Image (tube, grey):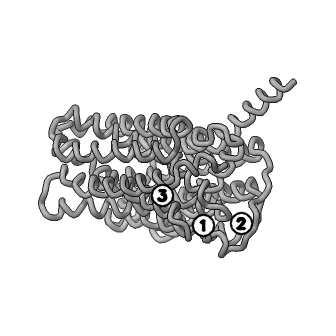
Amino acid sequence: MYIIYKRYRERNMKKALVTLALGTFGLGVTEFAMMGILPFIAADFGVSISDAGHLISSYALGVCVGAPLMVAFMRTWRLKKIVVLLMCVYFAASAAMALAPDYYSMLAMRFMAGLPHGAYFGVASIIADRLSNGRKSATAVAIMCSGMSVANLIGIPFGTFICQVASWRYIFAFSALWGLATLLSIWRFIPSMDALPDIGARGQFRFLKSLAPWLLIAATLLGNGGVFCYFSYYAPLLTDHSGISVTLLPLMSVIAGAGMVVGNLTGGMLSDRIGPGHTGRLLQIIMFISLLSIFLFSHIAWLSVVLMCIITFCLFGVGSPQQLLLLRFSKGGDLLAGCMVQLAFNFGNAIGAYLGGIPLTKGYDYNYTALPGFIMAAIGIVCYTIFCRRYEKLAKNKR
């Protein structure tokens, strides 16, 4: 009877984790598809590309605002109720973007679409951790996050194709339908879970008095920012510096997405074997070496593609260990801590894109975008090293 019960429980856990991954897939498509369809939206609304770029910034701003709002208003709710509401907001925003009549309404809806992003990752991480019951927690969180990497692999290229043959509005219509299907799946497969202990809105921030979460947040921001110094400009680097044909860029996008998918799952499994802190530091070291190699050797076409794949592997490989570690070191502030990786991720995107663009404004070639990147990654390694020496053994005992 115990074996039957164990298999039943594991089967239900897998369904719940896949359900959570459906949500991260939809969020991934909604966030990243915009980068490939900006020219189409700009032409449709009669605005410049730079103005259309504010639609990306608006989403990122929504991500940053949504996390503290969740802490303020939903910290006493049951976890399933929170993800249901977040998915409802995602569904409504996606439907509104598909029907947006002008640029400014689209800008507002992009902000609304960003609100549930970080909050969803935060709550879903807690649910995944509880479902694993302390066994292979990092792998469970990685499965939950896998939807984001799959979105980069197939969702975004497919969305760009739809935009080219039909209209960009169909992408967000698809997102709305996906959100509705995910909502129904959450209602069916996510078990009811007790709310987290309520220690007040101010108590949610108390864990930030410790050094450990700051080291993790810094390592996340620096590692991700370092990658995006290069990755924000990887397409022109491949074509103008590495000599790869423009017609092969869609294939390069798929290869980069494949690196993300494999890296995400590998990071989770590796964390359960050697520890999340050691995994994060190892992948950050590989990031540093790869960015340095891009700076020195990206003029070699085949090597440039290999390094791109390694970079995306590491970018998503560090996600689940970072998410899990912040939960481990955020007693009383689980909801806020669960969102912190996404906040650091988005800040890293913005800072990395800006710093990577500085060499280009000075007239340097595209390989110089990796120069500030490997400097940031090196500082991130220092943060991880300090964390591992002071807290990694403690992290293994925290459940």
Q: Which amino acid, mark 3? A: Leu
The disc placed on residue 75 is 2
Residue 171 visible in the shown view: no
Q: Position of residue 162 (x, y in %)?
A: 45, 42
Q: Which amino acid, mark 1? A: Phe
Q: Position of residue 58 (x, y in %)?
A: 46, 67
Residue at 40 percent of width and 36 percent of height: 259
Q: Position of residue 291 (x, y in %)?
A: 27, 47
Under circle 1, the secondary element is helix
The disc placed on residue 167 is none
Query: Looking at the image, which is closer to me, 284 or 392?
Result: 392
Residue at 37 percent of width and 61 percent of height: 42
Residue 363 visible in the shown view: yes
Residue at 47 percent of width and 37 percent of height: 261
Q: Which residue is labeled 1 in the image?
A: 207
Label 2 or label 3, whichever comes before in sequence order: 2
Under circle 3, the secondary element is helix
Q: Residues within 10 Å of mark 2 (few under 14, many from 20)?
A: many
Label 1 or label 3, whichever comes before in sequence order: 1
Res 386 quadrant in image: bottom left
Q: Which residue is labeled 3 in the image?
A: 216
Q: Residues within 10 Å of mark 1 (few under 14, many from 20)?
A: many
Q: Which amino acid, mark 2? A: Arg
Label 1 or label 2, whichever comes before in sequence order: 2
Q: Residue furthest bottom?
A: 202
Under circle 2, the secondary element is loop
Query: Looking at the image, which is closer to me, 290 or 97?
Result: 290
